[in-house]
Image (cartoon, rainbow, N blue to C red):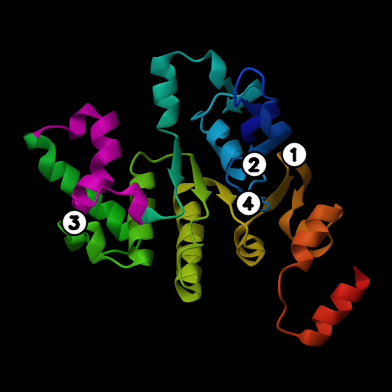
Amino acid sequence: MSLVELDNLRKEFGTGRQAVPMVAVDDVSLSVTEGETFALVGESGSGKTTLTRLLLWLLEPSSGTVRFDGQDLATLSAARMRAVRRQMQVVLQDPYSSMNPRMRVTDIVAEPLVTHEPGHRGRRARGKLRATVGELLDAVGLAPDVQDRYPHEFSGGQRQRISIARALALRPRLVVLDEPTSALDVSVQAQVLDLLADLQRRFGLTYVFVSHNLAVVQRIADRVGVLAGGQLVEVGQAAQVLRTPEHPYTRALVDAVPHPDPVYARRRKAAS
């Protein structure tokens, strides 16, 4: 069953009345099946971020349709859209930039609950809120007693775990992961990827994973879509697309990845 469906999606940005508009997303159609990890790859400026913003309805398309669980987002009332937003969350590349440095961890993770659930507001709900935050922190591998600390007191990997905990607060169905490991050391990347896989199994999550790191994509993704100049040039099973790419742009992306075996690298270059 498709959780997300994008049909003939196009987004133009105008620079003035006489200027030719810039096309950031050009006639993209794709679907994301519930429970899978769908990766979007492409170089900077290929349209990955714009496409995810359209998917999350943070931008409205110039034309085309975005459907979530069968619902056309353009037709929803403000109240219904608010309910749908609970089911769509995002984890950004730089966790520190998405946190208020003056807020404690408990308030950062609890913010979605306070915003969307009246039962978590007010002094009487404080104990319940801290208990819920403690459970979320435990789910991402952090001790519940870190709640009273501030973002600057954590490492990059720990801050990303806090961001993931915040994204899980409302028990979403879809999580968009926008380059979630690119700012982390390789060993920490592996830990975060393992955590994401575990959380997907435990909570039945669907991921849209944005990355330029094909090694990371090959490890975590079920399917992959390749964007070039705002167009979806190739889509398929991750193993097939990354091992035997069909489109020249995809082949160029794959060939650009360094390989530790120089003999294999020379053969690959000669074959291309």
Where is mark 1, residue-wise? Answer: 231
Where is mark 4, residue-wise? Answer: 44
Residue 56 in the image: state x and y as whole percent: 51, 33
> What residue appears at the point 57 percent right and 21 percent down from the top-left corner?
71
Depicted 49 relative to depicted 65: above or below: below
Marks 4 and 1 sit apart, C-alpha to C-alpha, by 13 Å
User: Which quadrant would residue 260 be assigned to in this image?
Assistant: bottom right
Of helix, strand and loop, which one carries label 3? loop
Residue found farthest to the left: 123
Q: Earlier in the sequence, mark 4 or mark 3?
A: 4
> What residue appears at the point 83 percent right and 86 percent down from the top-left corner?
263
What quarter of the picture does the N terminus occupy? top right
Q: Is residue 166 visible?
A: yes
Where is mark 3, residue-wise? Answer: 147
Which mark is drawn over residue 47? 2
Three-letter amino acid code at the position of disc 4: Ser
Look at the numbered discs 4 and 1 and tell me whether their residues touch, using CB distance below 8 Å: no
Residue found farthest to the right: 271
> What residue appears at the point 40 percent right and 32 percent down from the top-left corner?
86
**Left or right, 73 with reference to 46:** left
Marks 2 and 1 sit apart, C-alpha to C-alpha, by 8 Å
Look at the numbered discs 2 and 1 and tell me whether their residues touch, using CB distance below 8 Å: yes
Of helix, strand and loop, which one carries label 4? loop
Alpha-carbon neighbours of circle 1 within 10 Å: few (<14), some, or many (≥20)? Answer: many
Is residue 8 located in the magenta-colored stretch of the structure? no
Magenta segment boundaries in residue numbering: 96-122
